[in-house]
Amino acid sequence: MRSRTLVLLVLTTLAAAATLASSATALPKAPKVTQYPVTLDVVGYLDYTWTYDNREKCSLGYAKTVEEHLGFELGRPRPTKVSIVNGEVMLFPVFGSGTVETRLSGWQTTNYCPPGTPAPEPPEPTCTKKLRSAISVGLAPVQEPAGPEDPTPLVHDVQIAVLRHPPKPQTPSCHKDRPSIASEIWQADPYAGIIAPLGANDVQFLKLGIGKRLKRTVEIGGGCGGATLRAHASAAIPVHITSCVLTGKVVVTIVRTGRGFG
C-alpha cells in the first residue's frame, strides 16, 4: 500500500507540474517558471534475491530461492522538457521498455518421520520467467515532510521515477512468502519500479547551459530488513526469510538541447 501511495504521489506531482507550467502566464500572479527542451537517456537494472526456508527435521516444510531481475532502457535519448516551478524540478515522462526475469531454485521439502504418516507436500512453485512491460521515466521534486516553523529550503532536491506500466504481477505460488522491500521515502521493487534520489537539485538544472549534460548514477543496495538509495529504509525481517539481497543501478543522462523561457 505504501508503494502504491508513493507512486500516486509522484504521478500527481508530475501531472500538476505540467498543468501549472502550461498555464503560468495566464495566472494573475504567475509562479516563477523556467522551461527548456532536453534529451533524456536512462538505462539500469534492479536485482532482488530472497530465500524462504521453514524446513525442520520430521516436520512439514519447504525452502525456495527466487531471483528477480528488472532491466530497463529508453533505447535512445528521448526529447522532452524540464520545468522548474518555484524551484521544484519536473520532467515530462517519457516511455521505454522493461523486463522482469524471475528464476526459482533450491526447492526442497521436509516431511514427517516414521512412524508418522507423511503429509501431502506442496507442489513446486511455478514462476513466469519473463514479464515485459512499458516503463515511464520522469523527474519530480523530493517531497519531504516539513513543519510550519521549518525554514524554506534554499535548494530543492530531485528524484527520478522509473515505473512499470502496467506492473504485471508474478504467479501467486512464486510470489508467496516474498519479503517486502520497505522504504519510508523511496521505492525499489523489480515488479513496481524505482523512485530514488537523483543526486541533483534545482540550482544545477537552472545553471545547465545549452549543449551541456547532467549525468548521474544512482546506486541501490541493501539486504534483509532494509535497502538504501542514498536514503534510509528499514523493516523487521519476516520469519523464515534466511537471506535477501537488493542491488541495482540507474544511469541518467540529461542534455539541454535549446533555449526555453524563464
Image (cartoon, grey):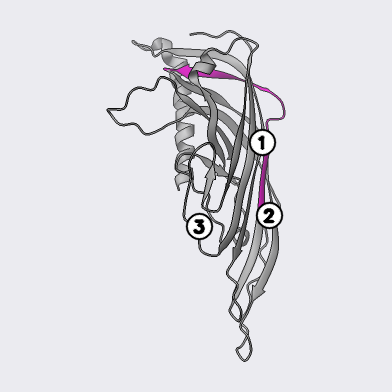
Report crowding for label 3: few under 14, some 14 to 19, many 20 or more residues within 10 A (C-alpha).
some
- Between the C-alphas of marks 2 and 3, the distance is 26 Å
The amino acid marked with disc number 1 is Gly
Q: Which residue is mark 3?
A: 237
The amino acid marked with disc number 2 is Thr
The label shown at residue 16 is none
Dot in front, 1 or 3: 3
Quarter of the rendering containing residue 114:
bottom right
Asked if residue 136 shows in the view, the reply is yes
What secondary structure is marked by label 1? strand
Q: Is residue 176 above or below residue 78?
A: below
What secondary structure is marked by label 3? loop
Principal SS element in the magenta part? Answer: strand
Residue at x-position 46% and y-position 37%: 8
Q: Which mark is first along the chain, 3 or 2? A: 2
Q: What are the residue bounds of the magenta stretch?
A: 67-86
Q: Position of residue 196 (x, y in %)?
A: 54, 35
Residue at x-position 68% and y-position 30%: 74
Q: Which residue is mark 2?
A: 128
Is residue 70 on the magenta stretch? yes
Q: Position of residue 120 (x, y in %)?
A: 62, 79
Residue contact between numbered discs 2 and 1, judged by CB atoms under 8 Å: no
The label shown at residue 44 is 1
- Between the C-alphas of marks 2 and 1, the distance is 21 Å
Q: Is residue 94 above or below residue 258?
A: below
Q: Position of residue 157 (x, y in %)?
A: 48, 26
What secondary structure is marked by label 2? loop
Report crowding for label 2: few under 14, some 14 to 19, many 20 or more residues within 10 A (C-alpha).
some
Q: Residue 90 vs residue 255: left or right?
A: left
Residue 214 vs residue 178, the one in the foreground: 214
Residue 166 vs residue 86, the one in the foreground: 86
